[in-house]
Image (cartoon, grey):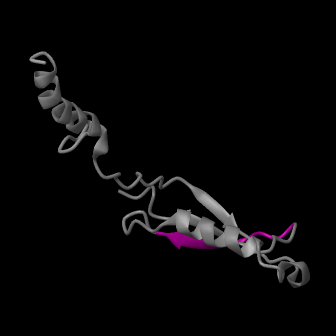
Amino acid sequence: MAYLFPMRMLMPLLLVGAAGWGCQAAGDKAPTKASLDCTATYVACGCGCCGGVEPEVRCLSCANRDDLQALIQKDQEAKKDPQCAVEGCSTGTKYVYCDANSP
């Protein structure tokens, strides 16, 4: 019985260590915001772009950290709208980081 007693005392410590209470690995940090790709562009068409028509250009600001991904997501959601079947095409909007090459 003397052999089992120390193991019984250690078992809760082993379980706590296995569960990771109070421990954090280096990879457990909160995710950081992805770096901004100021060279990216996107043409938003909503239900669809009309062929042969140049899209209207709208500037985004890299310095202000304008979120192109949010605009892409909004455009992708618009494509799922059932009204697209009757709306037809649009000229589209090309989003560009206009200050990407400025110092």
Q: Is residue 61 above or below residue 81?
A: above
* Foreground pick, 100 / 26: 26
* Foreground pick, 40 / 47: 47
Q: Is residue 29 left or right of residue 98?
A: left
Which quadrant would the C terminus be assigned to in this image? bottom left
Residue depicted at 50% across the width and 69% down the height: 60
As drawn, which residue projects farthest toward the top? Answer: 3
Question: Residue 55 in magenta?
Answer: yes
Which quadrant would the N terminus be assigned to in this image? top left
Q: Quadrant of residue 41?
A: bottom right
Residue 52: where, in percent of width, then height?
A: 87, 67
Residue 91: where, in percent of width, then height?
A: 78, 76
Residue depicted at 73% across the width and 71% down the height: 55
Question: Residue 57 in magenta?
Answer: yes
Query: Would you say residue 97 is visible in this rendering?
Result: no
Q: Is residue 24 left or right of residue 51?
A: left
Query: Would you say residue 41 is visible in this rendering?
Result: yes
Q: Quadrant of residue 86?
A: bottom right
Residue depicted at 48% across the width and 66% down the height: 67
Residue depicted at 35% across the width and 51% down the height: 31
Residue 6: where, in percent of width, then height?
A: 10, 23
As drawn, which residue projects farthest toward the front? Answer: 1
* Foreground pick, 29 / 33: 29
* Foreground pick, 40 / 15: 15
Q: Which residues are magenta?
A: 52-60
Residue 36: where, in percent of width, then height?
A: 43, 55
Q: Quadrant of residue 46?
A: bottom right
Q: Is residue 35 left or right of residue 57?
A: left
Q: Is residue 4 above or below residue 58?
A: above
